[in-house]
Image: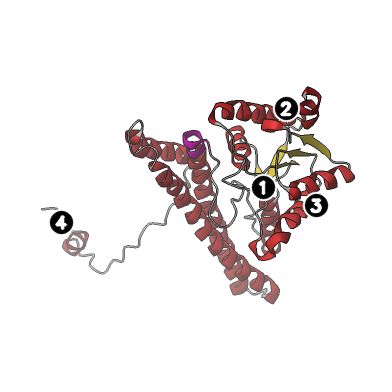
């Protein structure tokens, strides 16, 4: 039987010795290790379900798999917000004593570690989201809240700088660096025999715009039942940042027009328009009034309406 640490110390006459736990490691797994672990877990879980009757029902399970990392990251972000408020209070009080400085440094260290944990979960979520897109052809979207850009840091060693950088990080997460391109379209009923042609035309259009706008940020409405999902899936595969302006249910019929205002307020380089309702028609008109280039695909099956008119 293996002797316990207490009995060994007692035999050695060191029963009064206090043994402290080792300091926890401050190292975080690298990006490659995090992504590899997610891929391994995904393959282990869903590989056995492929080509079985469980393959399609497992799509809900796949969504939840991504959501695990998203919710874990959100929890760390809320903790980081609380620590940021604590830093703000300590900076405001301007306690220049040794104790006050030590308290501030300790909170900043906790905030830095919390942010690293949050970013690690975001890296894992993005890897899982890529696998989800490859499996289902849909871009993963959270049921509530946004999907912030991972690997952006604000952990700096001085209190005021931390608060300022944290605010800049939030702003960058809301609108990533790059040139915004708005994609807008409604819910179309497409025959299965025409679906491939439609998807090919849509992806070709997005590819051509991307060729002109190398730093594209795709902005859309996030409708998982409309053609937004095709554009979102394309952006996911191309690793192009996305920003979603959802409809505000509190605004009722005004919600669509409010979203148009949000689309145009970010000064997009292009507006890509597919068939939709009168709200989308207004978006196109206002974009042209503001001299924003419109890629008009409101003809049959997402073709240019001018070409369709000439053919008629």
Image check: 187 left or right of 175? left
Residue 132 inside the magenta-drawn segment: yes
Say which label, 2 or 4, has the lower sequence index.
Answer: 4
Label 1 vs label 3: CA separation? 13 Å
- Residue depicted at x 64% and y 75%: 97
Do callouts 2 and 3 mark residues in contact (Cβ within 8 Å)?
no
Rendered view: 279 above or below 18: above
Which comes sooner in the sequence, label 2 or label 1?
A: 2
In this figure, which residue is indicated by the disc labeled 4? Answer: 3
Q: How far is the residue under mark 4 from the one under mark 1?
A: 60 Å
Q: Earlier in the sequence, mark 3 or mark 4?
A: 4
Q: CA distance from mark 2 to mark 4?
A: 71 Å
Tell me the number on the disc at residue 243.
1
The secondary structure type at the circle numbered 2 is helix
Q: Nearer the viewer, mark 2 or mark 1?
A: 2
Distance between the alpha carbons at the discs numbered 2 and 1: 20 Å
Label 2 with label 4: CB-CB less than 8 Å: no
Answer yes or no: do the residues labelled 4 and 1 have beta carbons within 8 Å? Answer: no
**Residue named by callout 2:** 208
> How crowded is the residue under tag 2: few (<14 C-alpha within 10 Å), some, or many (20+)?
few
Q: Position of residue 8 (x, y in %)?
A: 18, 59
By secondary structure, the bulk of the magenta-drawn segment is best described as helix
Say which mark, if any, is on residue 45. none
- Direction from residue 88 to residue 272 in the image, left or right: right
Q: Which one is in front, 250 or 95? A: 250
Magenta residues (range)? 131-137
Nearer the viewer's eye, disc 3 or disc 4?
A: 3
Residue 87: percent from left, percent from top: 63, 68
Q: Earlier in the sequence, mark 1 or mark 3?
A: 1
Residue tagged by mark 3? 265
**Disc 2 to disc 3, how far (Cα)?**
24 Å
Indicate the secondary structure of the residue bearing disc 3: helix
């Amino acid at each position: 039987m293996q002797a316990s640490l207490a009995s060994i110390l007692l035999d050695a006459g060191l029963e009064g010795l206090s043994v402290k736990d080792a300091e926890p490691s401050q190292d975080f797994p690298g990006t490659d290790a995090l992504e590899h672990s997610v891929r391994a877990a995904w393959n282990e879980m869903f590989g056995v379900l492929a080509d079985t009757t469980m393959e399609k029902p497992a799509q809900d399970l796949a969504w939840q798999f991504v959501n695990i990392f998203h919710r874990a990251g959100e929890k760390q972000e809320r903790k980081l917000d609380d620590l940021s408020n604590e830093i703000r209070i300590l900076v405001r009080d301007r306690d220049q004593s040794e104790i006050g400085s030590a308290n501030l440094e300790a909170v900043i260290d906790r905030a830095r570690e919390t942010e690293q944990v949050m970013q690690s979960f975001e890296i894992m979520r993005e890897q899982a989201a890529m696998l989800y897109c490859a499996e289902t052809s849909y871009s993963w979207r959270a049921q509530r809240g946004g999907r912030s850009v991972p690997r952006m840091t604000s952990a700096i060693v001085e209190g005021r700088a931390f608060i300022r950088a944290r605010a800049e990080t939030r702003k960058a997460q809301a609108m990533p660096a790059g040139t915004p391109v708005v994609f807008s379209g409604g819910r179309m009923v497409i025959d299965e025999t025409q679906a491939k042609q439609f998807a090919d035309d849509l992806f070709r259009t997005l590819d051509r715009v991307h060729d002109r706008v190398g730093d594209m940020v795709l902005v859309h409405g996030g409708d998982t039942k409309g053609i937004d999902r095709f554009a979102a899936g394309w952006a996911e595969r191309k690793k192009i940042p996305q920003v979603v302006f959802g409809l505000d249910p509190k605004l009722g019929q005004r919600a669509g027009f409010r979203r148009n205002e949000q689309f145009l307020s970010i000064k997009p380089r292009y507006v890509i328009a597919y068939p939709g309702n009168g709200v989308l028609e207004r978006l196109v008109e206002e974009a042209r009034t503001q001299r924003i280039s419109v890629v008009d695909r409101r003809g049959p099956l997402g073709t240019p309406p001018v070409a369709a008119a000439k053919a008629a």
